[in-house]
């Protein structure tokens, strides 16, 4: 049986080759399309200025008249007058003698006795704390041994504070209160000195110092039968009712 179709006229025999070539071409065109870079172009407007005629402008020359500087003032010639003064007073030259001692100088040797030397006694101001002193300062009206004198001293101090206590009017108006610590010294003569205070306000400190300064003179404290100074501190509580 003879074939009616020409074998050379078979179109589908190279279809796989054509498909592969077409696929590669399409992939290449797709890659080029994706990777192609484009740039925005700015539109620049260029104007061309044409000058047909050139205008020459004449600039006037300005002349400034400068006055010449004034002539320097003429200086008067000063004539030097030399006066000859005769030496009338004879000047005596002072001779400065050396105070250093040489080898040929004679030193006056003399003996100085102990009675010829003036000795000045300096009394030391010794301070002994109130808790360690052998005999505490004696408040007026207190008697007994050292323990009784100590208790009486503290009691008299409290009575003195209650008697002379006065709340400052300015501090009361400003509602100022608090505790003031007062430090003072009972010197070896029995006087109250070196009064200092520390508190929440100057008004309260001033009032506390005023009360302590009203303390009477006492019999000074003694350490080994020697009058000594005794420091003492006491708190004063200012409280509004």
Image (tube, rainbow, N blue to C red):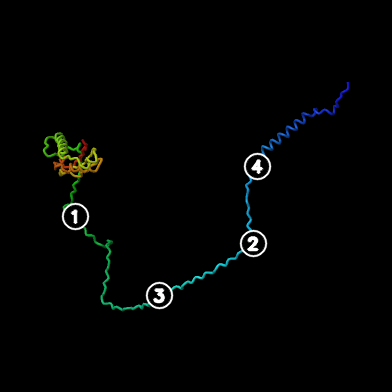
Residue 38's disc number: 4
Mark 3 crowd level (few <14, some 14–19, many ≥20, 10 Å Cα): few
Q: Residue furthest front?
A: 52
Label whose residue precedes the other's in the sequence (2 or 4): 4
Q: Secondary structure at mark 4?
A: loop
Q: Mark 4: few, some, or many residues within 10 Å (few <14, many ≥20)?
A: few
- Secondary element under disc 2, as helix, strand or loop, is loop
The CA distance from mark 1 to mark 3 is 81 Å
User: The C terminus is located in which quarter?
Assistant: top left
Question: Where is 74 relative to 186, above or below?
Answer: below
In the rendered image, which residue does mark 1 sit on?
112
> Can you tell which quarter of the image residue 24 is in?
top right
In the displayed structure, 101 sits above or below 188; it is below
Contact, mark 1 vs mark 4 (Cβ under 8 Å): no
Q: Nearer the viewer, mark 3 or mark 4?
A: 4
Alpha carbon distance from label 3 to label 4: 86 Å
Q: Are marks 2 and 4 in contact (CB under 8 Å)?
A: no
Pick whichever of labels 3 and 2 is earlier in the sequence: 2
Q: Earlier in the sequence, mark 1 or mark 3?
A: 3
Q: Position of residue 30 (x, y in %)?
A: 69, 35
What mark, if any, has residue 73 been given in the picture?
3
Quadrant of the rendered image containing residue 152? top left
Q: Position of residue 149 (x, y in %)?
A: 14, 36
Which residue position holds label 2? 52
Position of 80 with respect to 138 (left or right) is: right
Find residue 195 and report its horizontal and vertical position in percent.
Answer: 20, 43
- Relative placement, left or right, of 94 versus 187 is right
Residue at (64% x, 61% y) in the render: 52
Q: Where on the picture, by quarter, is residue 74?
A: bottom left
């Amino acid at each position: 049986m003879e074939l009616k179709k020409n074998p050379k006229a078979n179109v589908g025999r190279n279809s796989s080759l054509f498909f592969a070539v077409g696929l590669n071409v399409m992939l290449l065109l797709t890659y080029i399309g994706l990777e192609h870079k484009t740039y925005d172009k700015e539109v620049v407007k260029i104007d061309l200025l044409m000058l047909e005629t050139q205008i020459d402008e004449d600039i006037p020359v300005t002349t400034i008249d400068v006055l010449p500087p004034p002539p320097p003032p003429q200086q008067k010639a000063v004539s030097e007058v030399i006066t000859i003064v005769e030496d009338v007073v004879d000047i005596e030259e002072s001779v400065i003698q050396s105070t250093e001692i040489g080898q040929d100088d004679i030193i006056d040797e003399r003996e100085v006795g102990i009675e010829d030397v003036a000795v000045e006694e300096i009394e030391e101001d010794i301070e002994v704390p109130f808790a360690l002193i052998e005999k505490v300062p004696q408040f007026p009206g207190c008697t007994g041994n050292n323990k009784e004198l100590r208790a009486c001293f503290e009691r008299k101090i409290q009575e003195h504070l209650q008697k002379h206590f006065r709340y400052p009017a300015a501090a009361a108006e400003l509602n100022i209160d608090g505790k003031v610590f007062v430090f003072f010294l009972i010197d070896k003569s029995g006087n109250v000195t070196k009064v200092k205070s520390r508190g929440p306000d100057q008004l309260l400190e001033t009032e506390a110092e005023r009360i302590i300064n009203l303390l009477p003179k006492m019999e000074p404290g003694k350490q080994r039968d020697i009058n000594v100074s005794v420091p003492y501190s006491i708190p004063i509580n200012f409280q509004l009712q």
